[in-house]
Amino acid sequence: MQRPAIAPADFTCVLYAVEGHIATITLNRPERRNALNPRAYAEIEAAFQAATVDPEVRCVVVTGADPAFCSGEDVKEMMTGQAPATPRPVRTRPEPTPAAMAAIDCDKPVIAAVNGAAVGWGMELALYADIRIASERARFAELFIKRGLICDVGGLWKLPALVGPAKAAELLFSGDVIDAAEAERIGLVTTVTSHEDLMPTAMAMAAKIAANPPLALRFMKEGLRRTAYGDPREIGGWAIDVIYRLFATEDHREGVASFLEKREPVFHGR
């Protein structure tokens, strides 16, 4: 794992703090419901890299500044619904999203404290965690299908293992939003708390985990990944290749335009 290209002291979209062997990563664009722009993606990548290389960190908690966990990509900033002026670069060897792989490759246990909406890439981020704890205000949705896209590696690699292939297919194909109680029922989250108890609960679990031997924790996490989930790089590379192709479709532009214009989309399969 390489050291982060952006130092935590220079973060503008993410708060990063380490205390008592616990690194806390907080998405901090509350005015945009913690929607992600290129800078936010880069800082998420750098934050997980910082936690991975820091020998003092034994557990990571990722959350969002209220009122949301992460509302996905900042559609107004990153997707205009217009055809790109220049073609996206051709990738001879597609690679998974760097922020996704930084989260997945983090060798410390990761807890997602989901305090509100976790939709689109926000749900992906929650899926990259090893344990998910949800506030009663949490909502989850893989909304990519509504934008004429497919999900990132989390939905294809981790979601079926957590909730089963059929339920994963239902969530991915429909783009439906589910609440915290349903997320707990299907096994997406382990615990639902009151909103006020979310961070104390997550930090108490993180402290319990961090009190254990750090080398054994890392190997335990690696063992779980090997047996339960396999290697995400191949599926992640495939997903990025498909996402790049779908960005060029009329259906994607219609999905974004209808969202921005607050109307029902009309898709034509092209």
Image: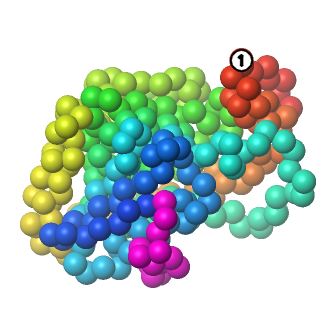
Across and down, in percent, residue 208 comes to 10, 58
Across and down, in percent, residue 200 comes to 15, 47
Q: Is residue 4 magenta?
A: yes
- Relative vertical location of residue 237 with respect to residue 72 in this rendering, above or below: below
Q: Is residue 154 magenta?
A: no
Amino acid type of the residue tagged 1 in the rendering: Glu
Quarter of the rendering occupied by the C terminus = top right
> Which residue matches tag 1?
264
Query: On the picture, is 115 further left or further right than 266?
Result: left
Q: Which region of the structure is painted magenta? A: 1-13
- Relative vertical location of residue 77 with respect to residue 224 in this rendering, above or below: above
Across and down, in percent, residue 195 comes to 24, 34
Across and down, in percent, residue 9 comes to 41, 76
Instruction: Report helix, strand or loop for mark 1.
Output: loop
Q: Main secondary structure of the magenta part?
A: loop
Q: What residue is drawn where x is 13% and y is 60%?
A: 207
Quarter of the rendering occupied by the N terminus = bottom left
Looking at this view, is 200 or 95 the one in front?
200
Looking at this view, is 146 or 235 the one in front?
146
- Does residue 76 appear anywhere in the picture? yes
- Does residue 219 appear anywhere in the picture? no
Query: On the picture, is 96 further left or further right than 26?
Result: right
Q: Quadrant of residue 185?
A: top left
Q: What residue is drawn where x is 35% and y is 79%?
A: 53
Q: What residue is drawn where x is 79% and y is 39%?
A: 81
Looking at this view, is 175 or 193 the one in front?
193
Q: Hey, which residue is sitting farthest front in the picture?
A: 31
